[in-house]
């Protein structure tokens, strides 16, 4: 689960990490008052969407002004004006995809004098099963680009959970960033705070890009991106309250209500599969035959007819879907339950695209009979290869 920058900064503030003063604004009329509560002389107006790269982003609509989703203002009026231009408009960044994201909130922040921008992140390193720090002198930039062109400018190490965070971890980062004097002590303290926060709140990712050295020589978190482990959010009421469902894919949101493992993708072939491994293999083989999957969907082992019906509805609600492949290997899951769900869903929402069904395993004959005795227009497939070939052919001709 991800949260907005302004929410992440409130959390940082509550742990004593240095952030700028700021106000979130939902309606243009509130912008002037909000900006007026800060002294200036510089204000920064920042679009709040769950995606990075806002500074270099572009708005889709006319009237949003020229620059991206992070703008400087030299007066309260100017700040209010920029906020007004951004609210309600669609910002496209490297991370939003071409559709972009609607800006429903802006954050008006005290402008900081910047002498240096660094990159800092904490994340769960699956390789070592530990929390890792990633730091770089190249802040404010695409870290992927830095990793590619100048990997020597990135420092990365993990923290042994048995000892936890130690001052030497912070010093390692401080020296790498070229900090001096009191800044080193500040860095050691800040890294400790971030590590503590990361563990206490069950985060998956915490990215401060940029972490800055201000013109007064202090460290400050100027941007903040936080992701939390969805499986642990239930034990953090304060975090779960920060969820902004308008930032989530409506299809994924619907799927989560029915406990379906669904991820929306960009392709044209909708997939309904049981088991994550088989779902991955199905996506791979669709690609192998020259098409792209529209989603990952694992209906799970104990799916009911209702769950299958909902899954089918979610797939067909995607206008990008030009064909559907149902690929079920019935182990715990029974093929007749899947067949009943598919038939029920087709009756309810209709079928406007080709449907290939491959059933195998428990109660396969019963499942096939249910589909054959219905008037649903199905292309039957014998195995995974056959299914993929048939759906790609049906869609691409
Ligand atoms: P994004 O990463 O989405 O582009 P950032 O919050 O990192 O958004 O902002 C982009 C750039 O804007 C930063 O690298 C920094 O140079 C500048 N910036 C952001 N917030 C402030 C601020 N409060 N004061 C001064 N400059 C800022
Ligand atoms: Mg940033």
Image: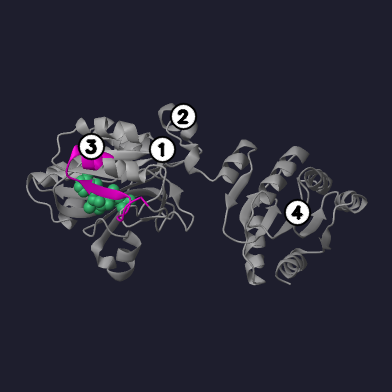
Residue 194 in the image: state x and y as whole percent.
28, 40
Q: Which mark is residue 328?
A: 4
Q: Answer yes or no: do the residues labelled 2 and 3 have beta carbons within 8 Å?
A: no
Query: Marks 1 and 2, how far apart in space?
Result: 9 Å
Q: Earlier in the sequence, mark 2 or mark 4?
A: 2
Does mark 3 have its CB less than 8 Å from ligand 1?
no
- Range covered by the magenta-colored residues: 63-80
- Farthest-out residue, top: 237
Q: Which mark is residue 235?
A: 2
Residue 380 in the image: state x and y as whole percent.
83, 61
Q: Answer yes or no: do the residues labelled 1 and 2 have beta carbons within 8 Å?
A: yes
Within 10 Å of the Cα at label 3, are there few (<14), some (14-19), or many (20+) other Cα atoms? some
Compared with 392, 184 (above or below) is above
Residue at 74% x, 72% y: name it: 397
Q: Is residue 79 magenta?
A: yes
Q: Answer yes or no: do the residues labelled 2 and 4 have beta carbons within 8 Å?
A: no
Q: Earlier in the sequence, mark 2 or mark 3?
A: 3
Does mark 1 have its CB less than 8 Å from ligand 2?
no
Q: Is residue 317 magenta?
A: no
Residue 35 in the image: state x and y as whole percent.
23, 35
SS at mark 4 in the image: strand
Q: Answer yes or no: do the residues labelled 3 and 1 have beta carbons within 8 Å?
A: no
Compared with 182, 289 (above or below) is below
Query: Marks 2 and 3, how far apart in space?
Result: 23 Å
Query: Marks 4 and 1, how far apart in space?
Result: 35 Å
SS at mark 2 in the image: helix
Does mark 2 have its CB less than 8 Å from ligand 2?
no
Instruction: Using residue 141 as the reference point, say whether residue 380 is left or right of it.
Output: right
Q: Which mark is residue 202?
A: 1
Q: Earlier in the sequence, mark 3 or mark 1?
A: 3
């Amino acid at each position: 689960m991800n949260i907005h920058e302004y929410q992440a900064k409130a959390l940082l503030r509550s742990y004593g990490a240095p952030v700028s003063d700021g106000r979130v604004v939902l309606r243009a009329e509130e912008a002037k008052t909000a900006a007026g509560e800060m002294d200036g002389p510089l204000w920064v107006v920042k679009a709040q969407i769950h995606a990075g790269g806002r500074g270099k982003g572009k708005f889709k609509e006319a009237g949003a002004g020229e620059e991206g989703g992070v703008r400087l203002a030299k007066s309260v009026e100017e700040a209010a004006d920029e906020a007004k231009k951004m609210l309600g408009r669609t910002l496209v960044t490297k991370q939003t995809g071409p559709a972009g994201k609607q800006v429903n909130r802006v954050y008006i922040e005290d402008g900081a004098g910047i002498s240096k921008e660094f990159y800092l992140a904490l994340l769960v390193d699956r390789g070592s099963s530990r929390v890792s720090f990633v730091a770089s002198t190249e802040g404010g930039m695409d870290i992927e680009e830095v990793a590619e062109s100048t990997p020597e400018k990135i420092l990365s190490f993990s923290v042994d959970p048995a000892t936890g965070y130690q001052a030497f971890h912070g010093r390692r980062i401080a020296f790498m960033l070229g900090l001096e004097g009191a800044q080193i002590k500040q860095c050691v303290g800040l890294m400790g705070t971030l590590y503590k926060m990361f563990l206490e709140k069950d985060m998956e990712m915490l990215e401060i890009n940029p972490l800055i050295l201000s013109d007064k020589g202090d460290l400050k978190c100027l941007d903040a991106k936080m992701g939390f482990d969805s499986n642990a959010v239930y034990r953090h009421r304060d975090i779960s309250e920060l969820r902004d469902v308008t930032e989530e894919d409506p299809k994924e949101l619907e799927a989560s209500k029915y406990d379906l493992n669904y991820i929306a993708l960009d392709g044209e072939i909708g997939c309904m599969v049981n088991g994550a491994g088989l779902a991955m293999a199905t996506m791979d083989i669709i690609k192998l035959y020259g098409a792209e999957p529209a989603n990952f969907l694992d209906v799970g082992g104990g799916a009911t007819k209702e769950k299958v019906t909902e899954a089918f509805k979610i797939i067909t609600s995607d206008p990008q879907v030009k064909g559907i492949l149902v690929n079920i290997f019935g182990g715990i899951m029974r093929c007749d339950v899947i067949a009943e769900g598919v038939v029920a869903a087709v009756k309810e929402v209709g079928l406007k695209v080709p449907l290939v069904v491959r059933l195998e395993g428990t109660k396969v004959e019963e499942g096939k009979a249910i589909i054959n005795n219905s008037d649903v227009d199905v292309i039957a497939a014998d195995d995974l290869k056959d299914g993929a070939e048939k759906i790609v052919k049906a869609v691409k001709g």
